Image: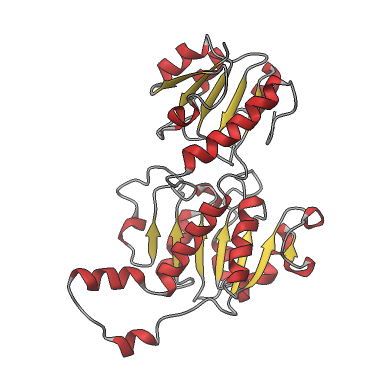
Amino acid sequence: MPTVVVNHDLPIADALDGRCEGLSVVSTSSNEDTVSALSDAEFLVCSSGGWDDSYLEGLGAGNWVQATSAGYDAFPIEEFRDRGVRFTNATGIHDPVVAEHVFALAFAFSRMIPEFVTKQADRIWGPRTEVSVELTDWTDRTVTVYGLGSIGEAIAERALAFGSDVYGVKRNPAEYDGTLAADRVLGSDELYDVLPETDLLVAIVPLTEETRGSIDASVFEALPDSALLVNVARGPVVDEAALLDALRSGEIAGAGLDVFETEPLPKESPLWDRDDVLITPHIGGRSNTFPDRFAALFAENYGRWQKDDELRNQIA
């Protein structure tokens, strides 16, 4: 009987149990248990943050690793190819949830939600007049989506629905087939062309050598001082030191951050203390439906594996 080893902090093993006929599900909680269980298993499910190179001890030709994340920079893809290990990511299942998270952060700033939460705790009503002139909306404002994969497309669709003027940045614009008009889809080298008019810059590119640190001091300098940054990509896409400098100097108005250069974000990080920063603990793609959404993807791929077909989202 084929066996899948699941090492994850969410109840994914429970969602998979009984979902695929003839599949045994083993849940592990430590690296050592995972390595041990892999010796008798064909498949491994884990997150990018949960990957450990020791797992390679139990993986060989014919095995399959299914990531729960869309990003896969933490996985040794070339090593998988050398060993004949199939690898798939979870592109597609995070799209609506991450898009909602982006606008939860953006709206929290534009509608001054943190300030109102504080006032609610102190039972303070108003002052309405003074606050009203500081509230903003997203109609006719410019949103630039840096990364037009499936999540970026979901963000762009929602930004259009809110009445925003939307640009998308994609490595190869010629490959784009989505909701944005062709003249609104830019190559990576054209990002700076739209930064001066960008009110919300959303980072959702994969982490590569090209994108690492690409949101840097020159980007913050090019943005209006009223602009917001939301990062739901990977922490190292943003140069955190440059971000802090930009916030301190008023080059941008604020940042909503779900990912960081170091995770968990160290307690000594100055980001914790800033009123112009909203922090969430890398949960942009998660919700109470995530285990079932993932289980549906895995079940589809398990069916393909049984037929020896190419797997959905196959990278290696």
Residue occupying the point 45% across, 72% down: 253
Q: Quadrant of residue 298?
A: top right
Between 34 and 162, the residue placed more toward the observer is 162
* Quadrant of the frame with the C terminus: top right
Q: Residue furthest toward the right? A: 174
Judge whether residue 68 can be spotted in this image: no
Q: Position of residue 66 (x, y in %)?
A: 58, 29
Residue 71: x %, y % from top left: 58, 41
Residue 120 or residue 57, whichever sits in front: 120
Residue 214 relative to residue 260: left or right: right
Q: Residue furthest left?
A: 122
- Residue 152 point in image, percent of width and height: 62, 56
Left or right of 271 on screen, residue 5: right
**Is any part of residue 296 visible from this angle?**
yes
Rendered image quadrant of residue 266: top left
At 51% from the left edge and 64% from the top edge, which residue is drawn?
A: 229
Horizontally, residue 135 falls left or right of residue 189, namely left
